[in-house]
Structure formats: C-alpha cells, structure tokens
Image (cartoon, grey):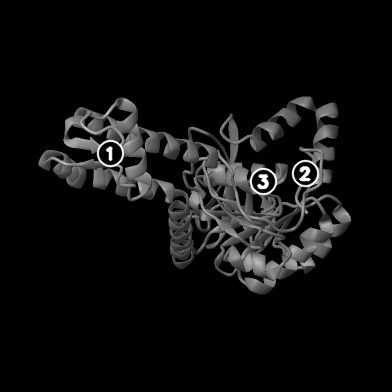
Amino acid sequence: MTEWSRRGRRPGPLYGRVVTSRGRQVAAAPTAGAVGLPSHAVSPLRAVTNRLLFALGLLVLCSLIVYLGRDGYRDNAHPGQPLSLLASVYYATITLSTTGFGDIVPVTAAARLVNIVVIFPIRLLFLVILVGTTLAVLTERTRTDWRIAQWRSKVTGHTVVVGFGTKGRSAIAALRESGVAAASIVVIDTAAEAVAEANAAGLVTVTGDGARRDVLAQAEAARAAQVIIAVHRDDTAVLIALTARELNPGGVIVAAVRDRENEGLLRQSGANQVVVSSDAAGRLLGLATIRPSAARVIADLLDSGCGLDLDERAVTEAEVGRPAREAEGAVIAVHRGGHLLAADDPQAARLQAGDRLILLATAAQR
C-alpha cells in the first residue's frame, strides 16, 4: 500500500507495531493500529549489559567491604582463621543472591552493623537489578500508555500523512520547511521499518492500512485539519479518501495519483486537491528538453529554501478593491472561490475579501 519503489520490495503484512525511539528500533508484538510516539530508547542488549555490569560492580563492592572487615567474620570451615579473599567473595555472592547458608557469619558488632547498614541495602539493590528487565518493561508500557492518552487529549488541527514513502517524506519535508511542527504531523504506514524511521524523525506514527477506518481513527483523523494521501496505488488512494472524508467531513484532503484518469475519481471520493505525479514529472521532463532554463526555475520553486519559493497569504483590507498586480509582493495568481486566476486576469482587476494571493518570494523574504 505504501510507496516502496525506493526500497525495491513490497511491504509486509498490514499490521505490526514498533515501539518509539530516536534512531533505534525496539521490536514489539505486531498490533494493528498501534500508536508510536517519539522517545529515547536503549537497545535490549545494551540494557541487559548495563544491568549485568552494575550487578557485577555491586558484587565486587560487597566482596571488598567484607574482605576489609574479615576479622569480624567466622568461617565454620576454617575456625580461628580470618576470611580469605575467596571466602569474602563467596560470602558476598551468597548474601546478595540468597539469605545465606550460615557457614560464614558476622560475629563482631562492627561486622553486624556493616551488614545492616551497607550489605543489606546492596542486597536489595542487587535483587532489584535481577528483576529490572521486567520492571522496566512494565514501567515503559505504563509510561507509553500515559503519553498516548495525553497526546489524544490534546491533538487537534494536525496533519495526517498516509504513506511514508518518497512522496510522503517529500510532503513532510515541505510541511516542516513551512514551519509546521513535527508534533502536529501523524504518519500512517503499514511497514514497521517505515514507522521506525518516522519515529526516529520525531513524528507520531500509527501502524496499519490507512484505508481502514479504525487505523484512521487511531490517528485522530476526525480532528485533523488536513489529510495527505501519498500511497503508491491509485485504488488505495481512493479508498483512503472515502474513509477519511467519512470521518472528517470538513477537513482538507490532498491526494497524489499516478494516472490522470483517476483524478476525477479521487475528487468524487472527497479529495479537495489532487496531484497527478506522472503528468507533473512528464511535463517537467519535456520542459527541460525544450526550455531548460524555465525547467530550472520550476525545479527551484519545488526545492524550498534554495532560491525562489512560492508563498501564499490572504488579501489585506488595504488591498481589497485594488488590482492584483498592485498588491504587495510579486503576485502571480489569485485563488478565489475554488478557482485560480492569473494576476493579469480581468477578474483579478479588483481584489475581494477572502481572496488568497500566490506570490513569488525568496527564502529571505518569507
């Protein structure tokens, strides 16, 4: 369902979950419609290694404490002799892991005080480390559920991007360059690998098929300001548009299609704007052959922040009634009532309240 031409393979099953991370993927059981939030995570191998090293450090510390106070202990296997280094390590190991066997016992008041004040707290910490993995999983699960609940209670007016392939990434890049915060973008994709990559980029994700109502509901599409459909198949885009429009009657839906013959079908399915990717690429190729300089200008416009950019703003009160060409900035078109008018169109000779001006600008002017 997602655009996978860049990777050269088809996606896996239409379900799966990836626990959130920044740069590292933490695998979890496949779950349809699972929400993932950006967060820092440590790989399981590193987490286990850290716990083992810490537990070993506690064992060494405890052995050293017992050995330094060896005169306060009695070894029933060697009566009358102070504890050896091996016996100290043995006592520390048995004490930390169990309640002890009684073959080595503290007999002086100082040794008993050390066991109460120092050895016993170390033993408790050692036991916590032994069950640390389970505790960490439970804590992380609770923390993740709490963060998702907090996100659901606050998210509104966000952008849902269905498909994290080449088109989806480019759309998100354009949003980010225009000042849209990463926290207000939600990505839907079927592939765990793509979901992990989106999480690593700081985006909220939902794993699943965007054509399914429950998956779009998990992304809170009903409260979204806009839905961007950037999947590989046109028939899938139609299904997603129908479902998204049913959930969100007033939201803006923008979809990409490969073939122009499917543009009308997408609009009938609820899409406000439809971009025909194959036609756009073909026209740019032809223009680059016939008028290469003009093609470079168009390519520059598409590459935001690198030269010329397209900007859009509402007409001001002072500009109402004036010609479009007299408005502030390099106006090239006027959007009025769903129609696009050229700046020199007679209908654009008098700007009206509610018009949107499309301007040429440099990155410094924006």
Q: Where in the figure is residue 148, as x and y percent of width and height?
A: 49, 61
Residues at badges 3 and 1 in contact (C-beta under 8 Å)? no
- Quadrant where the N terminus is found in the figure: bottom right
- Residue under the point 47% across and 49% down: 133
**Which residue carries the number 2 mark?**
4
In the structure shown, which secondary structural element does the residue marked by tag 2 occupy? loop
Q: Where in the figure is residue 26, as x and y percent of width and height?
A: 57, 46
- Please name whichever residue, 172 or 347, is drawn nearer the observer in this view of the structure: 172
- Please name whichever residue, 33 or 286, is drawn nearer the observer in this view of the structure: 33
Task: Please tell me whether residue 37 is drawn above or below residue 122 in the rendered image.
Answer: below
**Which residue carries the number 1 mark?**
76
- Residue under the point 75% across and 52% down: 231
Q: Amino acid at mark 3?
A: Ala
Q: Is residue 361 left or right of residue 171?
A: left
In the structure shown, which secondary structural element does the residue marked by tag 1 occupy? loop
Q: Where in the figure is residue 364, as x and y percent of width and height?
A: 48, 32
Q: Amino acid at mark 1?
A: Asn
- Residue under the point 72% across and 67% down: 212
Q: Which mark is residue 197?
A: none
How many numbered circles does the render carry?
3
Q: Amino acid at mark 2?
A: Trp
Q: Residues within 10 Å of mark 1 (few under 14, many from 20)?
A: few
How far apart marks 3 and 1 lie (CA) works out to 63 Å
Q: Nearer the viewer, mark 3 or mark 1?
A: 1
Q: Earlier in the sequence, mark 2 or mark 1?
A: 2
- Please name whichever residue, 46 or 142, is drawn nearer the observer in this view of the structure: 46
In the structure shown, which secondary structural element does the residue marked by tag 3 occupy? helix
Q: Which mark is residue 194?
A: 3
Q: Is residue 276 left or right of residue 307?
A: right
